[in-house]
């Protein structure tokens, strides 16, 4: 009889555990970060002009993260082409060039010459005519 009780308790525990694990797996699936197109990141070279074509065909995906200081940072994931290679330009939406790129895209511009000045947290981008 004791063996039957223990076996019943185990079955109930297994059912409870499975339910909990199913709920947890579902939560993990819902909380997964969005999947982004797996392309290499666009890398600029300091003090060098890089010519890019930006694909404005779809809204830019956004990626939200926290920087080293715990400040929330939202980056636009901008599909670009450099020569024959497709790349992704990860650009902070608070960067002033983001507004300029969007405004020029509204006017039909697709090709850009970008100059990077500085690096790391002092990086600035300029659109060169």
Image: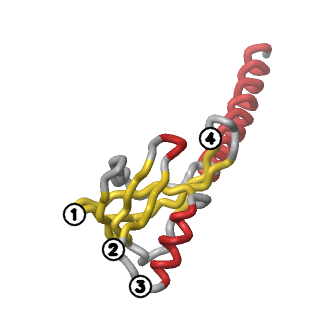
Residue on which disc 3 sits: 108
Per the model, the C-alpha gap separating discs 4 and 2 is: 30 Å
Q: Nearer the viewer, mark 4 or mark 2?
A: 2
Per the model, the C-alpha gap separating discs 3 and 2 is: 9 Å
Q: Residue at x 62, y 35 (%)?
A: 68
Residue 80: x, y in percent? 35, 64
Residue 107: x, y in percent? 46, 85
In the drawing, what numbered circle is on residue 83?
Answer: 1
Q: Nearer the viewer, residue 74 or 120?
A: 120
Vertical comparison of 30 with 7: above or below:
below
Q: Residues within 10 Å of mark 1 (few under 14, many from 20)?
A: few
Say if mark 1 contacts mark 2, CB within 8 Å: no
Which of the two labelled residues, at mark 4 and mark 2, occupies the earlier sequence position?
4
Q: Would residue 99 be found to the left or right of residue 115 on screen?
A: right
Q: Would residue 57 be found to the left or right of residue 76 on screen?
A: left
Quadrant where the image shows the C terminus: bottom left
Per the model, the C-alpha gap separating discs 3 and 4 is: 33 Å
Residue 36: x, y in percent? 45, 56
Residue 52: x, y in percent? 32, 65
Per the model, the C-alpha gap separating discs 1 and 2 is: 11 Å
Residue on which disc 2 sits: 111
Q: Residue at x 33, y 48 (%)?
A: 45
Say if mark 3 contacts mark 4, CB within 8 Å: no
Which of the two labelled residues, at mark 3 and mark 1, occupies the earlier sequence position?
1
Which of the two labelled residues, at mark 1 and mark 2, occupies the earlier sequence position?
1
Say if mark 4 contacts mark 2, CB within 8 Å: no
Per the model, the C-alpha gap separating discs 3 and 1 is: 20 Å
Q: Residue at x 74, y 29 (%)?
A: 13
Which of the two labelled residues, at mark 1 and mark 4, occupies the earlier sequence position?
4
């Amino acid at each position: 009889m004791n063996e039957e009780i223990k076996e019943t308790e185990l079955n109930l525990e297994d059912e409870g555990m499975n339910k909990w694990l199913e709920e947890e797996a579902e939560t993990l699936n819902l909380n997964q970060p969005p999947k982004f197109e797996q392309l290499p990141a666009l890398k600029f070279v300091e003090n060098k002009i890089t010519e890019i074509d930006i694909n404005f065909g779809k809204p830019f995906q956004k990626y939200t993260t926290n920087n080293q200081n715990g400040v929330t940072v939202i980056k636009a994931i901008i599909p670009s082409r450099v020569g024959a290679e497709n790349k992704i330009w990860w650009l902070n939406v608070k960067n002033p060039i983001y507004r300029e790129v969007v405004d020029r895209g509204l006017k039909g511009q697709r090709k850009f010459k970008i100059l990077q000045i500085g690096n790391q947290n002092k990086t600035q981008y300029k659109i060169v005519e």
